Image: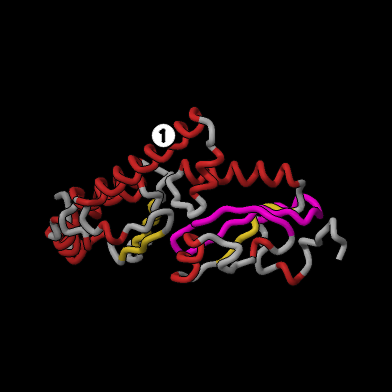
């Protein structure tokens, strides 16, 4: 092995170097994340196989606590760049996750990154904004019926719109919360998909019809009776 280069494309690294990994050269440096099913809990950088190095001597107590109590795995975000570029990417990732409200166990590094009073104030402000967003999300879904079905940044499947017996008063607050939580909703019976980033007046009208029918099933019964008596349905 050349001490100055690393072949990031080789088969033995495919477990960690995926299609979304930025391979920027053959330097042994990489930026990586550690994940649990709940998301990223650590962002780091290093040389060679540092991304997969896990032991009490090389990792903090906070890292080992998460690692020991969860199913965890590393993901290489970028590799093959210079040490300076590696540090820049790592810091940008940390800032992004802090701004998004992620709970990183390498918090001390985050604080060190914002080591000047002005930057430390910026860090605290970012954390405060993240806490406020999380509080707003919690308050948003507290009084929403069926909020337990909402999957943040994911997809939830509901058997039928007709299960919203409260009609529009139940359905649309639920869909609003889903949009705020970036959750796609699929209604299996009606084969309707409601995406959080796509509003359609036509779809809203369609959903309103289904919701009204769910609240007032007589509408459906009247229509079925109408279909059963089409021969009698004449204007004259």
Residue at x-position 61% and y-position 53%: 44
Residue furthest front in the image: 57
Q: Is residue 44 magenta?
A: yes
Q: Which quadrant holds residue 210?
A: bottom left
Tell me, what colour scheme is on the image? secondary structure
Residue furthest right in the image: 2
Graded by Cα atoms within 10 Å as few (under 14), some (14 to 19) or many (20 or more), the crowding at tag 1 reads few
Q: Which quadrant holds residue 52?
A: bottom right
Residue furthest top in the image: 118
**Is residue 231 at all visible to an observer of this figure?**
no
Q: Position of residue 51 (x, y in %)?
A: 65, 61
- In terms of depth relative to the viewer, which is nearer, 224 or 205? 205
Q: Position of residue 101 (x, y in %)?
A: 43, 46
Q: Is residue 202 magenta?
A: no
- State which quarter of the image contains the N terminus: bottom right
Q: Which quadrant holds residue 3?
A: bottom right
- Which residues make up the magenta segment? 21-47
Q: How many marks?
A: 1
Q: Establish if 106 lies above or below 163.
A: above
The residue that mark 1 highlights is: 125
Q: Position of residue 141 (x, y in %)?
A: 26, 50
Residue at x-position 59% and y-position 67%: 54
- In terms of depth relative to the viewer, which is nearer, 43 or 194? 43
Q: Position of residue 195 (x, y in %)?
A: 41, 50
């Amino acid at each position: 092995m050349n001490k100055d280069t690393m072949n990031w494309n080789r088969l033995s690294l495919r477990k960690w170097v995926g299609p979304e990994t930025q391979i920027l050269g053959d330097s042994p440096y990489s930026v990586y994340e550690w994940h649990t099913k709940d998301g990223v809990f650590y962002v780091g950088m290093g040389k060679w196989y540092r991304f997969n190095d896990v032991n009490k001597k090389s990792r903090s107590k906070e890292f080992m606590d998460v690692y020991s109590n969860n199913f965890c795995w590393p993901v290489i975000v970028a590799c093959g760049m210079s040490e300076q570029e590696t540090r820049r990417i790592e810091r940008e990732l940390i800032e992004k996750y802090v701004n998004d409200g992620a709970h990183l166990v390498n918090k001390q590094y985050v604080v060190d990154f914002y080591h000047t009073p002005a930057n430390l104030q910026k860090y605290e402000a970012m954390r405060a904004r993240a806490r406020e967003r999380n509080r707003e999300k919690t308050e948003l879904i507290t009084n929403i019926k069926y909020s337990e079905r909402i999957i943040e940044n994911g997809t939830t499947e509901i058997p039928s719109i007709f299960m919203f017996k409260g009609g529009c008063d139940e359905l649309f607050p639920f869909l609003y919360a889903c949009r705020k939580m970036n959750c796609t909703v699929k209604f299996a019976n009606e084969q309707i998909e409601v995406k959080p980033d796509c509003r359609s007046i036509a779809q809203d009208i369609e959903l309103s019809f289904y919701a009204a029918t769910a609240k007032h099933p007589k509408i459906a019964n009247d229509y079925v009776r109408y279909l059963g008596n089409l021969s009698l349905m004449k204007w004259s």
